[in-house]
Amino acid sequence: MIYGKIWCVVKPTVGIPLFLGAVAVSSFAVHYMLLTHTTWLPAYYNGKAATTAAVQGPATLATAPPGEVVASVTPAPKQ
């Protein structure tokens, strides 16, 4: 463990509940802020139907006529 020596300073009976309590409080705070500061999450929890964009069909691809293939590689300098 990287920070194993912390238990020489803080008792595990104090540190572990304090750490887990901090995780729980911060998780609650994040979820509360998401609920109060976004419009999509409350709508999701209330079960409103999502509005989706219309899907268009596949676009036609432009094809080149068959012919000569040209590479765009620069030649190596001659020695």
Image (spheres, rainbow, N blue to C red):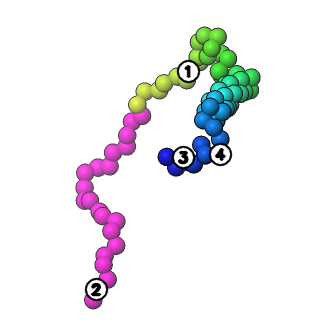
**Label ID, residue 52:** 1
Residue mark closest to the camera, 1 vs 3: 3
Mark 3 residue crowding within 10 angstroms, few (<14) / some (14–19) / many (20+) = few
Q: Which one is nearer the viewer's eye here, 20 or 29?
A: 20
Q: CA gap, disc 2 to disc 4?
A: 71 Å
Mark 1 or 4, nearer chain start: 4
Q: Which residues are magenta?
A: 59-79
The amino acid marked with disc number 4 is: Val
Q: Nearer the viewer, residue 70 or 27?
A: 27
Q: Nearer the viewer, mark 1 or mark 4?
A: 4
Q: Is 33 placed left or right of 13 in the picture?
A: right
Residue occupying image coordinates x 59% and y 18%: 51
| CB under 8 Å between discs 1 and 4 | no
Q: Quadrant of residue 42?
A: top right
Q: Residue 70's x, y, as percent?
A: 29, 63
Q: Earlier in the sequence, mark 2 or mark 4?
A: 4
Q: Is residue 26 visible?
A: yes
Mark 4: secondary structure: loop
Q: Residues within 10 Å of mark 2 (few under 14, many from 20)?
A: few
Calculate the distance from the C-alpha at mark 1 to the C-alpha at mark 4.
Answer: 55 Å
Q: Furthest residue to the right?
A: 36
Q: Residues within 10 Å of mark 1 (few under 14, many from 20)?
A: few
Camera-side mark, 2 or 4: 4
Which residue, given by chain and number where applicable, does mark 2 sit on?
78
Question: What residue is disc 4 on?
Answer: 9
Give the label, 3 or 2, closer to the camera: 3
Q: Secondary structure at mark 3?
A: helix
Q: Earlier in the sequence, mark 1 or mark 3?
A: 3
Tags 4 and 3 in contact by the CB under 8 Å rule?
no
Residue identifier under label 3: 4
